[in-house]
Image (cartoon, grey):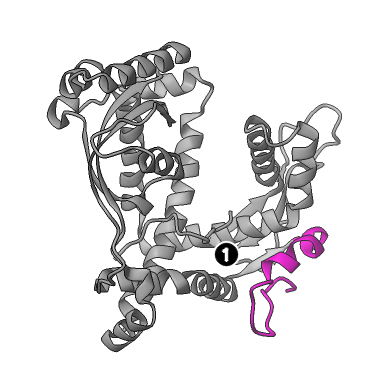
Amino acid sequence: MEFSHTYKGVTQVKFIYSAIFIVALIICSSLPSFAQENEPVVIDEVVAQINDGVLTLSRINREMKELENALVQQNKKTAEAAKAEIEGKKGEFIAGLIQEELLIQKGKELGVEQDVDAEINKRFIQIMKEQNIKTLEALYASLRAQNYNVDEIRENWRREITKDLVLQREVDSRIYYGWTGNEIRKYWEANKVKFTKPEKVTLSEIFLNYAGRDENAVKAKAKDLVDQLRKGANFDQLVLANSDRDDVQQTKGKVGTFTVNELTEKLIGPIKGTKTGGYTDPIEVEGGIEILRIDSREEASQESVFDEDQVRRAMTYEKIPSERKKYIVELKKDAYIEIAEAYRALILPYLNKDDTTAEATKTDK
């Protein structure tokens, strides 16, 4: 049993066995003219040694800069404020990168590479569908034209997916399958209110893609389509003539049936405010505009329904945060971790904060 990596309230942050700790990467040949002969030139600094891997200062600085830029691009911070905020969390950030490296190394040990590659390809295909792009080559060209680095995207996804798969297989699934029948029934009896029948809606859509178009023109078209629909225009005809989904000829705009709490907040509001058979106002979603028709609605019920999978999941979600922390603590205990002297005071309080035993991470050898 594998779980989605987007648990509510669960966030996971981002040690060569050797008798000698590598302090810096150096080059001893082809030196600049101002260097003395055979004098080593430091080109990077190793901040931490993690089993057979190292964490360098250049990587730390690069990823911190990426976070700063993201805060600025999201209009959440000025450049100065973003830099100050990220710098203030540097110790915590580096500790997160060390834990990330441990999970990625564990992923290699478990042999998850094939599943990781499959998920990466799935994500690219999904983007192609959303943007109505026919080939991977065209998608890559589009991303590069927008100044995205495809190799960096793949590497970031690879790290993220590897961490998620390790935690799902090593922690989440073991929790899920570990409950006994008596424990499940007892939990349900004590928490029946959590298992009442939720509201369900069946939806159809018209999706208008922003790709290659003027966004204001797309928004105006969406508004016009809603006006036509509310005046009685034929939905099936309009969806076939206007929707940018690749499979619209097969689906005729039908999306499916969902429990309301499965939907994003951006959709829940418009759906709740629309009667069965009615159409929502245009909703701006990733990559375009969506118009939803409420095909049918099944009201919520206060009657508690026993569903073993649902109960197992609820019990598992409650234990995941603490069990994932314990798992990472054990990874650290079993690992060879060496932190450069200059960085220990900065990193150790965060690296060891979840340890429940007196034994700290091995960093003072």
Residue 212 showing in the rendered view: no
In percent of width and height, residue 135 lies at 28, 23
In percent of width and height, residue 78 lies at 76, 32
**Residue 67 lies within the magenta run:** no
Residue at the image point whose x is 54% and y is 22% from the top: 147
User: In the displayed structure, does residue 28 sit left or right of residue 9?
Assistant: right
In percent of width and height, residue 345 lies at 81, 64
Q: Is residue 279 above or below residue 48?
A: above
In percent of width and height, residue 80 lies at 80, 35
User: In the displayed structure, does residue 261 sit left or right of residue 353?
Assistant: left
Look at mark 1 in the image and give the residue it sits on: 51
| Kind of residue at disc 1 | Asn
The residue furthest left is: 250
Residue at the image point whose x is 32% and y is 73% from the top: 311
Q: Is residue 236 above or below residue 200?
A: above
* Quarter holding residue 196: bottom left
Q: Is residue 203 above or below residue 252?
A: below
Between 203 and 11, the one lying in front of the other is 203
Q: Which residues are magenta?
A: 340-365
Q: Quadrant of the C terminus?
A: bottom right
Secondary structure at numbered mark 1: loop
Residue at the image point whose x is 47% and y is 57% from the top: 163
**Residue 353 lies within the magenta run:** yes
Q: Quadrant of the N terminus?
A: bottom left
Q: Callout 1: 10 Å neighbours few (<14), some, many (20+)?
A: some
Q: Is residue 188 above or below residue 275?
A: below
Residue 241 showing in the rendered view: yes
